[in-house]
Image (cartoon, helix red, strand yellow):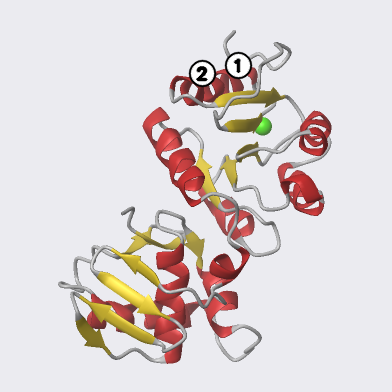
Amino acid sequence: MAYDHRVERPAEPRRTVLVVEDERNIRDLVCLHLGIEGMTCVPAADGTEAMEHARRQPFDLVVLDLMLPGLDGLSVCRAVRRETINRDVPILMLTARREEADTVLGLESGADDYLTKPFGVRELVARARALLRRGPRPAAAASGDGSRPLSYRDIEMDPARRRVRIGGRDVDLTAQEFQLLYVLLSNPGIVFSREALLQRVWKDDTYVTVRSVDTLVKRLRRKIEADSANPSVVLTVWGTGYKAADV
Ligand code: CA
């Protein structure tokens, strides 16, 4: 098979993806379709095998099933983050239930995005591409602490001056609105749970709840969206959280 990792390959610029899934059909499906996209997949059937690969070679992306025999997906996720070689690799979690998403996307786990089973092939490819486009976790941008200016469609953000311009027009945002928008626009297409946003926007403030995120999003949309009832920038991901629309 095209993605068989036992075949010796010359050094090539293809993206390498570690695919960790105990269900063979799903593992083969993921490898097949990412392979069609030009990615080289290294399959692993359990967490131990995954860690052996992760310690040995750098990956551009890890697709990781949450429910694995033995070492589960969250443990693998944390262990990968502890290994220097793949510390910053984007991780796409596969979950069986939507309710697991918040755990998966929480800051503790270190996952960057998730897909709920059963998932469509197009969705898989789109998420994988979005993560690969973003590249290694930009620690500063992912945490929202970055100071680099960014541009997204006609929105320009300059954290040093806390300035936002949309289509050349200055928009007045509060510090929290700015922070929320900066986190989302730094990671287009990546879903953030309310908990993850809470931690990134409010840091250690314990007087806020996940509902504060919804309120903040509403306020932000009124300032930046052409039609805040039909947002095109800050999108709601049902039952999970929010994301910036893919560029
Ligand atoms: Ca499984």
Q: Which residue is mark 2?
A: 32
Q: Residues within 10 Å of mark 2 (few under 14, many from 20)?
A: some
Which one is in front in this view, the residue at disc 1 or the one at disc 2? 1
The residue that appears at 57% across and 59% down in the rendered structure is: 102
Give the residue at x 58% y 24%: 40
* Quarter of the figure that contains the C terminus: bottom left
Q: Earlier in the sequence, mark 1 or mark 2?
A: 1
The answer to whether the residues at label 1 and label 2 have Cβ atoms under 8 Å apart is yes
Q: Residues within 10 Å of mark 1 (few under 14, many from 20)?
A: some
Identify the element where label 1 is drawn. loop
Point out residue 235 in the picture as x, y percentages from the top left corner. Answer: 33, 62
Image quadrant in which the N terminus is located:
top right
Judging by the rendered image, the residue that carries numbered circle 1 is 3
Question: Observer-nearest residue: 236 or 188?
Answer: 188
Residue 50, position as x, y percentages in the image: 76, 33
Would you say 86 lies left or right of 202 here? Answer: right
Is 132 placed above or below 57 here? below
Q: Quadrant of residue 139?
A: bottom right
What x and y, as percent, mark residue 219? 31, 84
Which residue is most to the top? 1
